[in-house]
Amino acid sequence: MLGFESILDRFSELLLLLILLIVANGAPIIARKLLLDVAACPLDCGRNFLDGKPLFGISKTVRGLISSLLCTALAAPLLGLSVSIGLTIAVGAMLGDLLSSFIKRRLSIAPSRMALGLDQIPESLIPLLLVQSQLNLCAEMIVLIVVLFLILELILSRILFYMGIRDKPY
């Protein structure tokens, strides 16, 4: 069990991981506004799943995947972490994003519509689990970071909406 003092000792690490998660998940949103139609082809190539619904939907694009990988890989060394940690965080975040989109399509939730928890937890939990052993993260740290990410994403989503970067706030 991780005590309060231990969490405080690792506070800077917690902040760095939160920043990387925000970069990994935010880069596709920023890239959509900056790059418009560049590499905007859907990752699922418009294919449907066995239920006849889209695999992921039109909002999951090659542009989003590439922007997440590049931005997070570049941000990691600036934060004192390796490029491989940055790439792993980005891959995990994008896998979590695709998983949540896949589930949302099965539940007939429209692309870019929010499903509280489903939109935030896989996008933060999967990358943290992927780097858990490398960064010696305990379960309490992971849970704390996931909860903080959920809260921050809801706040940042509103800010990005008011700035005209997001089309819809969460």
Image (spheres, rainbow, N blue to C red):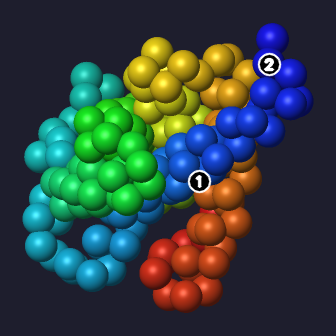
Task: Tell me residue 152's x, y (percent).
Answer: 68, 57
Residue drawn at (60%, 68%), measured in percent from left and top? 157
Q: Residue reaching furthest bottom? A: 163
Q: Nearer the viewer, residue 71 or 134?
A: 134
Residue hosting label 1: 114
Give the side of residue 159 with respect to residue 69, left or right: right
| Residue ranking furthest to the top | 1
Q: Give the residue type at disc 1.
A: Met
Label located before the other in sequence (1 or 2) = 2
Tell me what residue is drawn at x 80 percent, y 18 percent: 2
Q: Is mark 2 on a helix, strand or loop?
A: loop
Residue 104 visible to the viewer: no
Residue at 33 percent of width and 52 percent of height: 77
Between circles 1 and 2, the one closer to the viewer is: 2
Can you give x and y, in whole percent of width and height, for residue 149 in the image? 64, 47
Seen from the viewer's position, the closer of residues 71 and 99 is: 71
Residue pointed to by mark 2: 2
SS at circle 1: loop
Q: Is the residue 128 above or below the residue 34 in the image?
A: above
Residue pictured at 86% horizontal, 30% vertical: 5
